[in-house]
Image (cartoon, grey):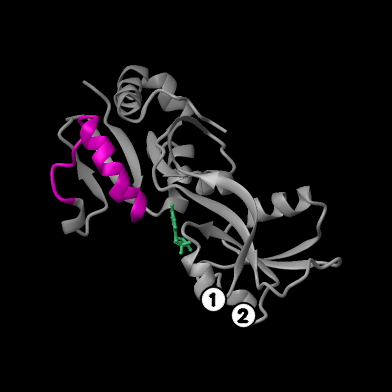
Amino acid sequence: MLHTVTLALTKGRILKESLPILSEAGICPIEDIFDSRKLMFLTNIQHLRLLILRGVDVPTYVQFGAADLGITGKDQLLEHGGEGYYEPLDLKIAKCRLMTAALPSSEVKLERTVVATKYVNVARRFYAGLGRQTELIKLYGAMELAPLLDLSDEIVDIVDTGNTLAAHGLVAEKLIANISSRLIVNKLAMKGNFTVVNKIINSIRNVVGSENESN
Ligand code: AMP
């Protein structure tokens, strides 16, 4: 009997853009995900089920083997640190940039810069690489408000069109990383369940192209 394989998806924009890729790869949920409050779905493939998670949780589920595979943004992988999984495929969807931003008038402080972000690990590494001292403030949303209300000097956030920053009078400054969604695979699942897991990876690779990016 085949062991059930679990693929964790990221709700929101990434889900909307990954479902057509999965469908083209022959993987379809047996009910409408958007029409349900459920977080776990069976698929047309008997031994494959889908989870719908927040992006921040996908690397954790895959790291500990609660999910065998996952699809989430590179921003979440950079923040998580990459332990316990491989990153075999760039799906080239939900593209955006991880950037620093500040009010246009602000000068780079020589002493400690206060940075508000949900990406505290990424920010810590990035500013350390610039040789700048920071105090990091962890937020879970609405980062754009922090410089306006003097909570922070700068923010680290996802930028797509730049409209959200502009609406708050902020300007994007330094590019930390170009972001797209990636397929990740639990290291043990890759070994123990090689045939099924590899078949899923290959069917998705056939849709998104063979270019293998894992930076
Ligand atoms: P924008 O106004 O187009 O620059 O979009 C910025 C906001 O949209 C960010 O604060 C993010 O929350 C969200 N966003 C944009 N692109 C993505 C993406 N690929 N993945 C997740 N969130 C995104």
The region drawn magenta spans: 10-32
* The one of 12 and 54 positioned closer to us in this rendering: 12
Q: Which residue is mark 2?
A: 148
* The one of 109 and 45 positioned closer to us in this rendering: 109
For the point 53% across and 71% down, the residue is: 166
**Pointers 1 and 2 in contact (C-beta within 8 Å):** yes
Direction right: furthest residue: 110
In the displayed structure, does residue 178 sit left or right of residue 45?
Answer: right
Is the N terminus in the top left, top right, bottom left or bottom right quadrant?
Answer: top left
Direction top: furthest residue: 195
Please, what is the three-letter code of the amino acid marked with disc 2?
A: Leu
Direction bottom: furthest residue: 149
Please, what is the three-letter code of the amino acid marked with disc 1?
A: His
For the point 40% across and 23% down, the residue is: 210
Q: Which residue is mark 1?
A: 168
In the displayed structure, does residue 174 sit left or right of residue 169?
Answer: right
Residue 23 is inside the magenta segment: yes
- N-terminal label among 1 and 2: 2
Mark 1 is surrounded, within 10 Å at the Cα level, by few (under 14), some (14 to 19) or many (20 or more) other residues, namely: few
